[in-house]
Amino acid sequence: MKAFTYLLLSCLLALPVAASAEVVVVASDSLGITSLNQADVRQIFSGKRSTVDGVAVVPLDLPADDPAREAFYRKVLGKSASQMRSHWARLTFTGRGNPPKIVSGEDELAILLSSSSRNYIGYMDAAMTRPGMVILYRAE
Amino acid sequence: MKKTLAMLGACVSLLPALAQSATVAELERRLEQLERQSSSRTSVSDVDLKVGGFINAGAAATNNLTDNVVSGAGPTEELSPPTYAGLDEEVTYDRLTSAGIQVQANVSDRVSGTIQLYADGADDFDAQTEWAYITYQFTDATEARAGRLVIPLYMHSQYQNVGYALPWIELPREAYDIAPVRSMEGVDLTTRFQTGNMAHAVNVFHGTLDIDVGINGTNATFRMRDITGINLTSSLGNLSTWLSYVGAEANVDILPGKSAYDIDNDYGYFSSAGFQYDNGALLFMAEQTQLSIANRWFPANTGSYATLGYRFGRFMPHVTWAEVDDDGYNDVRNDPVGRFLYNGLASHQKSWTVGVRADVATNLALKAEVSRFYDLGDDAQSAAAIPPNPLLPGGLPAHQTGSLFNSVPDRDDTPLVFRLAAQMVF
């Protein structure tokens, strides 16, 4: 029994420590949306919803190897990369939607958010946000 | 090599420009280009083409089974062992090997066209057009499609060939084999809306289809007119639900010429209700499906399953219980032809499936499963329907059972099906 307890404890301790960096969902401050709740963010980034308060929004993804991407999907949607691929396969092959377009990194995301006529929404490490962006949601 | 160097040079020279003074237009163009490169290197037009596909490679077999010969029921010599949906004790690959490819052309923000071809080993890899439709986007939340569409009969119907998108190697046949149809020609309309924190999508459609079906060894064309359906998908957090109803006018000429047993403009309906809960680690799904046609002999089959899985890193062990049962035998009990036809389409069985899915690499899953079947057929019903086959003088093999096995496994057998597969999407 004791051995089992130790085993359980060591398993718990060995659980990967969640990336400590805070991930935030951002858009241009000219978008007119000031905050989103977790349900909104989940629905936008899983293709279940394309408007917020009547405003069409377009999600953007960071590259697959970006640590903020893994953290975002883990914390906000509770899904791993392969689970998201399964999810998008269901939509893509039934014509229900395509995964978000992928930008090259935070720099490109920042430029697209601030200057595009499309209402892009992205996520990034909280430390990378810059002027002109509005933080819509913080992933605790 | 030279080309690679040139491309590398171009990339390097592009980098500073990107960092410093890239305009949005350039970036958006680059985004489109990157997308196009990643999806299709041989785009022949300016249209934004997306190419994707899926491949299922698998092998399956049953354990050693022997036929349970019902006494006095037709040929008793050299009975071949019972098979399950084309599987026998020899390992076969063709039943679980299939592939699909899809091209989506986004002509404008509003208009796109999509074609998906699908071929499977069970059908000698004769490619079929599963989907071929034009999409028109009315608003950000509403779109219409016209062409050839896979009918959304049940929760997983529209992506049932995409193994990677499912926990199992193949869907529980108890629930998904009860409908003999897949694609229709027609139109559909989908709109998404919100109520509080719930996201919904409602889909309505109308169409027709003609397919060749075999009922008890006879060839017939199954025609459905006025296929009209509605389904609602709702999601709240980790939970999503599915409700669907499809009605149609069904026609099958069972015998040459006119016969009272033909399905003649009889109303048929498919319905299903299901839910999925997935919190990232725990997966719980259940669904009930039904098919019925209101004529004098058609069995009303009801299928259902429940699946529980738990993810440990890349591995997800899962267990599924499934059942199919028929209803309506009392209506045909005293009609030899009716009960013969009834038993040909009635299904009665239960199964347990345990399996594991391993997400071993990007876009690739390896899966292993074993299913154990029990409560096969309904003795009271099948015994009453044993030939002589009233439709085919000279007779069919003797074992109409009403399970998804083609005959009755011996009572001492424990019918098992083993499956192994690698499934990917791209």
Image (cartoon, helix red, strand yellow):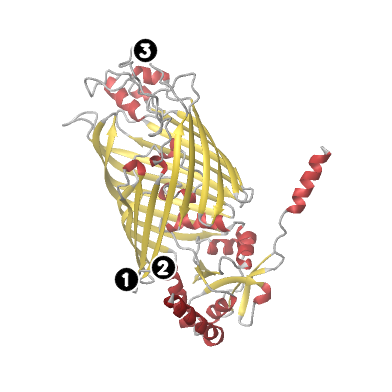
Q: Name the residue under label 3.
A: B71
Q: Mark 1 points at which residue?
A: B44
Which type of secondary structure does the marked residue at label 2 adopt?
Answer: loop
Q: Which quarter of the figure has residue B145?
A: bottom left
Which type of secondary structure does the marked residue at label 3 adopt?
Answer: loop
Q: Quadrant of the C terminus of chain A?
A: bottom right
Can you tell which of label 2 and label 1 is closer to the viewer?
A: 1
Q: Where is residue B368 shown, x and y percent of the image?
A: 53, 41
Label 3: chain letter: B
Q: Where is residue B290 shown, x and y percent of the image?
A: 41, 37
Checking the image for residue B139, the label placed there is 2
Can you tell which of label 2 and label 3 is closer to the viewer?
A: 3
Mark 2 and mark 1: Cα distance apart in space: 29 Å
Specify whether B391 is left or right of A89: left
The numbered mark, 2 or 1, whose residue comes first in the sequence reads: 1
Mark 2 and mark 3: Cα distance apart in space: 65 Å
Q: Is residue A61 above or below residue B158?
A: below
Q: Which amino acid does label 2 sit on?
A: Thr
